Image (cartoon, coloured by chain):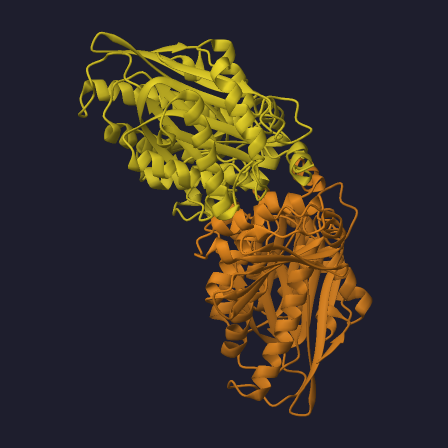
Chain colours: A yellow, B orange
Amino acid sequence: MKDITGGVVAAKGFKTASTNVAIKPQNTKRDMAMIFSEVPCVTAGVFTTNQVKAAPVKWDYRIVNEFDTAQAVVVNTGVANACTGTEGYEYCNDEAKATSEVLGISPDSVLVASTGVIGAKLPMDKIVAGIKKMPDLLSDSEEEATNAALAIMTTDTVPKQVAVEIELSGKTVRVGGMCKGAGMIHPNMATMLCFITTDADIDKKLLQEALSDIVKTTFNMISVDGDTSTNDTVLVLANGLAGNEKITSKNEDYDKFYEALYVVMEGLSKKIAGDGEGATCLFEVKVINAKSQEQARILSKSIVTSNLTKAAIFGHDANWGRILCAMGYSEAKFDPDIVDIYFESEAGKIKIVENGRATDYSEDEATKILSAKTVTAIADVKQGTQSATAWGCDLTLDYIRINADYRS
Amino acid sequence: MKDITGGVVAAKGFKTASTNVAIKPQNTKRDMAMIFSEVPCVTAGVFTTNQVKAAPVKWDYRIVNEFDTAQAVVVNTGVANACTGTEGYEYCNDEAKATSEVLGISPDSVLVASTGVIGAKLPMDKIVAGIKKMPDLLSDSEEEATNAALAIMTTDTVPKQVAVEIELSGKTVRVGGMCKGAGMIHPNMATMLCFITTDADIDKKLLQEALSDIVKTTFNMISVDGDTSTNDTVLVLANGLAGNEKITSKNEDYDKFYEALYVVMEGLSKKIAGDGEGATCLFEVKVINAKSQEQARILSKSIVTSNLTKAAIFGHDANWGRILCAMGYSEAKFDPDIVDIYFESEAGKIKIVENGRATDYSEDEATKILSAKTVTAIADVKQGTQSATAWGCDLTLDYIRINADYRS
């Protein structure tokens, strides 16, 4: 497997476009993006488990589950089109219709996604004007892919793209994606917005199975603030243009494709966690030697979600008591008296707790390790052989500044 | 029922003392307190459900459950005596022994409580020196009760006391308490530290039953940061000196006593929520017309716990989408399309959502209402007749400042 560039246009036959239609009037950055495949794609999707589902989530769920293929995705930021009633669903319909007209495809092959303020109405005149501009802007250049990744950002500070290349039955197959995260990030089944394209030829059911499986250990293991959004969506479009022997069973090619998809999804997940609203670092939590995968996942996610632990990480403070405390109030049983805890980063590795009690570690060394851009906490629960990793970020002054006044 | 002053010394026969022993060397405020009853008290307690239980929690659990009475409580701040192994439990034993010697009571009638940094060892020489000073300082004056309430504070900004007076079988009965909160506040069975005294004569089992029941709708309904502490403790001591006819069944007197205890516990809970670390306001959430108590409790607690909602409250921003979103990711089912949401404070009341969608409300009026010291959000789920209230606070820049550098 090879890391490549290009995000959603890395795979053959995919193009992207983006533009600024000032959905928030004061907005000067691009706020609409389109992904288009020259040929129809089989699709898979996972969506928010929040009972309050935004209209685009309902629309996409229908398209992914009731139709064999789709060919385009239209995304806007600024307004989430959530809590907008039946009118909100009509907006999705109108977006799909406008897109189908300019691209000459069926409205039922258009996926839509929105992110931004909940409750506000989509300014449909601007959205439709944006859609009409897209066909002339569509391009398979890396530059335009990056522009699209910029267009879907809200409070994100950097565009997020990952792509890899593998070989299947003698053919080059590519998988690439882009996503946006930042706030209201505590996915349960999916994260904010993530779009993955591939030119692999693969059966729709197997694509969905791979996606649903990988989500559990990637997007569902990140947390910025514990708030599961109304709009969480991960979509995969596979157009088959790589010309590989179609994957119709869980053979060796499936395993290779699965691994490529995993690398893209894990990479995008970590980018979201590390660029959480106001974050100054990526906070990685590994629970090792657990009795079960489930125990390891629950414990690692409880640590990565703890406000007090996250604030301590912001302060480069090895306040391990908060880590043990966060493990203690999780649903997973463990024995606090045998736990070892380590901190690790590019600056070194230090054991701070042995059998539930502080070691004689150096605070200076701990602070040095905790001052890196990626900080890992490792909890060895000594009960088995399973492990899990969760990703988050520190809780900072800027998180509050951003969220105390998000709508202005 | 009459509100009175005096906190833990409001009831007959209770005295308190406090002093500074510099448990944190730089500490200049009082950091140890004692409560003492002239005669033995029946006791009841509820404790943290965190699997990581501090040594004092284990000690008190034993005293409350294995002995008929207790007579003194010793409290320290600065060090939590949590994650300190068997040595930590020995410290409790030593504290009880030192206390028993200076007061002339059994070590098994001494309750202990600690709050502060997890993992650090109790400086026993200082603690014992503090205990030896206490007998001369014991007083039933209100001033000394307030000093004790100050002594148990950590990052709290104000001492927290409540007391009430009722009449039972012609006798005046008093119930009063003090508590501390501030951070790591998301009780599940109890909160940080709360001590309640009463001169009521009541059966030990009934006292425990009343306490356990009231905790569910008071301390268990507050949240500052979602982190359930290792040290959460609520203790009630009843010494019977009021001379009322002993309460041995759930008669009218029991109901009156229950109500008095409820008022004290609700009052102390709200004081903890409103004085959460860095908080600028008390955030109250009412869910009304729910199908069941449980549904109302889960929904209100999910809203009061949402970081995004709490940050919006800090910004005086009527970002109701975050409230509906937080209801949506809770475990409780409801119909988002029929929910009404109101904001209320001393500055007025405003309906901002009707049937899941924004009303035509004035942002200026909403901001005015949200700028009060106590802000209430009301969600009418229109599914039944039950309701619940949860209390929390806003999430502020100061919360991060305090917790990024708590140990220094």
Residue A242 place in picture, x, y as percent:
28, 12
- The quadrant where residue A397 appears: top right
Residue A269 visible to the viewer: no
Is residue B55 left or right of B402 when viewed as pictured? left
Residue A302 place in picture, x, y as percent:
47, 41
Residue A136 visible to the viewer: yes
Q: Residue at x 43, y 39 (%)?
A: A57
Residue closest to the eye, B330 or B220:
B330
The N terminus of chain A: image quadrant: top left
Is residue A31 left or right of A298 when viewed as pictured? right
Q: Is residue B352 above or below residue B251?
A: above
Q: Residue at x 25, y 18 (%)?
A: A201
Residue closest to the eye, B340 or B220:
B340
Is residue A126 left or right of A113 when viewed as pictured? right
Marks counted in the figure total 0
Q: Is residue B241 above or below residue B7?
A: below
Q: Is residue A308 above or below residue A35?
A: below
Q: Is residue A355 above or below residue B293?
A: above
Residue B227 place in picture, x, y as percent:
55, 47
Q: Residue lying at the far bottom in this picture: please name it.
A: B170
Residue closest to the eye, B306 or B319:
B319
Is residue A5 left or right of B375 when viewed as pictured? left
The C terminus of chain A: image quadrant: top right
Q: Residue at x 54, y 50 (%)?
A: B324
- The quadrant where residue A50 appears: top left
Residue A155 place in picture, x, y as percent:
60, 29
- The quadrant where residue A46 appears: top left
